[in-house]
Amino acid sequence: MKELKNFRFTLHKDSNTLDWITELEPPILGRNQFYRILDCIAGLVCLLDDCKTKHNLLLWNPLTKKVLILPNPTIESDLVESSCFGFGFDPLNCEYKIVRITYVGADSLTEVFRVKTESWVRIDVSYIGCGSIPSIVYQQAYVNGHVNWISSNHIILAFEVGSEVFKELVLPKALDKVDVQGLSIAVWKGFLSVFAIENSKVCLWLMSEYAVEESWTTKFVIEPYAIYRQIRGIRTNGHIIFEDLYSNLISVDPQTQLIEHLALGVQGTLSAFHMKSYSRSLALLDLG
């Protein structure tokens, strides 16, 4: 699924050539708003307008065309310096949730939106300090019932959606000296993963057993990274979609290093391009 500044959404088959399936009818969005795809989980797409102070959010089911526009969060202040959102699913209680971490100076405030009650609830989390601010606030990885971010102090901040409890996970020791801006968190073939860019190479570290530090392993190395500009998506087969130096989309098989050029018909700039894996569901069907 891809998104552009004029809110054009298209669905593609997850095949070798990413064949076009259909264009999706987008939800009604304001003209002056810029929504990015926070994530697609269990059939729902979470859209976030992070160019606005109040951070407009909505949940959208492209299959049923149901849309839930979230009410404004309860924590609003002129003193808010930054906010981070996470979107996840509690499989035990079959409930979607959005967590928001807000930073005011050295303090943090956290609230959770529960879809079943359609309301924000503030939770008591006092230990998340400035050092735990996710380094890229719109980049998350939902794995094993947890929303995960890489934080500024070189750890992984994890939020368990069911219990609404935070925990910290340790990154591989080999990444201690890698600039946090060179790290990207992702889901690769269902596993929590971290891409590390260093010395013109991109390495994928994979946590084969969630929350077990000793299970970190280097899965592969792609070089030279200099021909790529940015990671734009990860396919179900493990191939990685990059933007190259000429603003083209290419798919790289990390094991064979083979490169495939993609022609997805992107209109506009790739900076406004978002790609996520999507699976259909009947979520939000009970909305009026």
Image (tube, rainbow, N blue to C red):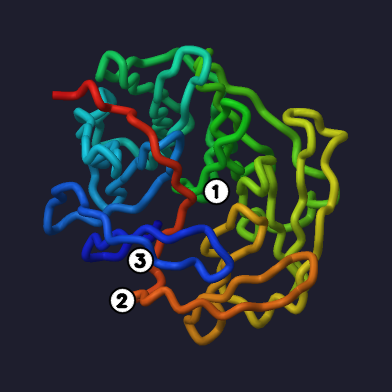
Give x and y (percent) for residue 261.
Answer: 56, 80
Q: Amino acid at mark 1?
A: Ser
Q: Which residue is at the far right?
A: 214
In terms of secondary structure, where does tag 3 sit? Answer: helix
In terms of secondary structure, where does tag 1 sit? Answer: loop
How many neighbours does mark 2 have within 10 angstroms: few (below 14), some (14-19), or many (20 or more)? few
Which of marks 3 and 2 precedes in the sequence?
A: 2
Give the residue at mark 1.
135
46 lies above or below 273: above
Q: Is residue 197 left or right of residue 232?
A: right
Q: Amino acid at mark 2?
A: Gln
Q: Which residue is pictured at 81% across the width and 44% down the height?
A: 172
Q: Marks 1/3: CA distance?
A: 20 Å
Which of marks 3 and 1 precedes in the sequence?
A: 1
Give the residue at mark 2.
267
124 lies above or below 260: above
Split into 4 quadrants, where in the image is the C terminus?
A: top left
Give x and y (percent) for residue 209.
Answer: 78, 32
Between marks 1 and 3 in the image, the one whose residue lies nearer the viewer: 3
